[in-house]
Amino acid sequence: MEILKNKKAALRVKFRVTSMLNECAWAHGDPLMQSYHDEEWGRPEYDCRALWEKLILDGFQAGLTWKIIIHRREAFREAFRGFCPEVIAKWDEKDVKRLIENPKIIRSRSKIESTIGNAKAYLAMKENGEDFSQFIWSFTDGKTILNDGIDIPAQTPLSQKISAELKKRGFKFAGPVIVYAYMQAIGLVNDHAPNCPYRTRIS
């Protein structure tokens, strides 16, 4: 029985090593990045609040790497009260100063202030009867675009279009490059590498 358990454990390890060799290279070498790749990146997200949170975090990533953000994500969630737009939209200068003094997050005044503004923009859409999830997914008719996973663009005509529509609604830190990273994160596009097992699992 013990030998059988050892064999099964060895097979699991072998499968995981083989899988990692085929996965997207950017996820390797860091447990949080690996977990994010395996469990979230590219998987379709439909929850309005979660979609808004992901857009905000991608905005904070501007000029930085996603690794920095993922390692601070829980601190962000705590500092921004679970990314509840209804709460954040009421914040003022006192809250901005509180966040700027928080060493656990990205202390950028412009990004913090844009988050408050983006909360107001999100709520304005809601008040106008515009569901954020339906709005985002309407650009692909509710479907995930499967790319080749080889040539990954920084932006596309679609990310430019979505960016323009977000800006019309008052969103900031939502340029076409940020939006394309956002599209990858929420599963609007599938950019997993050709041999990555998660590419087909998501599709």
Image (spheres, rainbow, N blue to C red):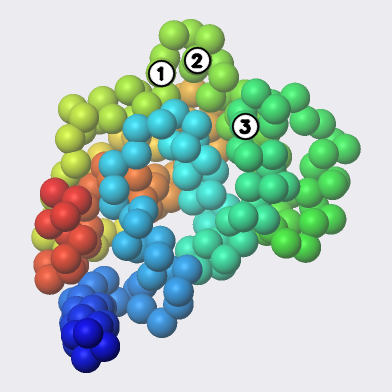
Q: Tell me where residue 188 appears, x and y as whole percent.
A: 26, 42
Please tell me which residue lies in front, 89 or 3.
Answer: 3
Q: Is residue 91 visible?
A: yes
Give the SS element for disc 2.
helix
Instruction: Give the CA separation, mark 1 to mark 3.
Output: 16 Å
In this picture, is 145 found above or below 73?
above
Task: Please name the amino acid that badge 3 sits on.
Answer: Cys
Quadrant of res 115:
top right
**Label 2 vs 1, first from the N-terminus:** 2
**Residue topped by disc 3:** 84
Q: Residue at x 69, y 31 (%)?
A: 88
Task: Please name the amino acid that badge 2 sits on.
Answer: Lys
Q: Residue at x 61, y 38 (%)?
A: 83
> Mark 2 touching mark 3, by CB under 8 A?
no
> Mark 1 against mark 3, which lies toward the viewer?
3
Please tell me which residue lies in front, 31 or 128.
Answer: 31
Give the SS element for disc 3.
loop
Give the SS element for disc 1.
loop
Task: Please name the amino acid that badge 1 sits on.
Answer: Asp
Q: Residue at x 28, y 30 (%)?
A: 137
Instruction: Give the CA separation, mark 2 to mark 3.
Output: 14 Å
Please tell me which residue lies in front, 97 or 39.
Answer: 39
User: Which label is found at residue 141?
Assistant: none
Q: Is residue 156 visible?
A: no
Q: Residue at x 70, y 27 (%)?
A: 87
- Name the residue at the front extreme: 1
**Residue topped by disc 1:** 131
Please tell me which residue lies in front, 122 or 13.
Answer: 13
Q: Tell me where residue 136 appears, x and y as whole percent.
A: 34, 30
**Dot 3: few (<14), some (14–19), or many (≥20) neighbours within 10 Å?**
some
> Mark 2 touching mark 1, by CB under 8 A?
yes
**Residue topped by disc 2:** 126
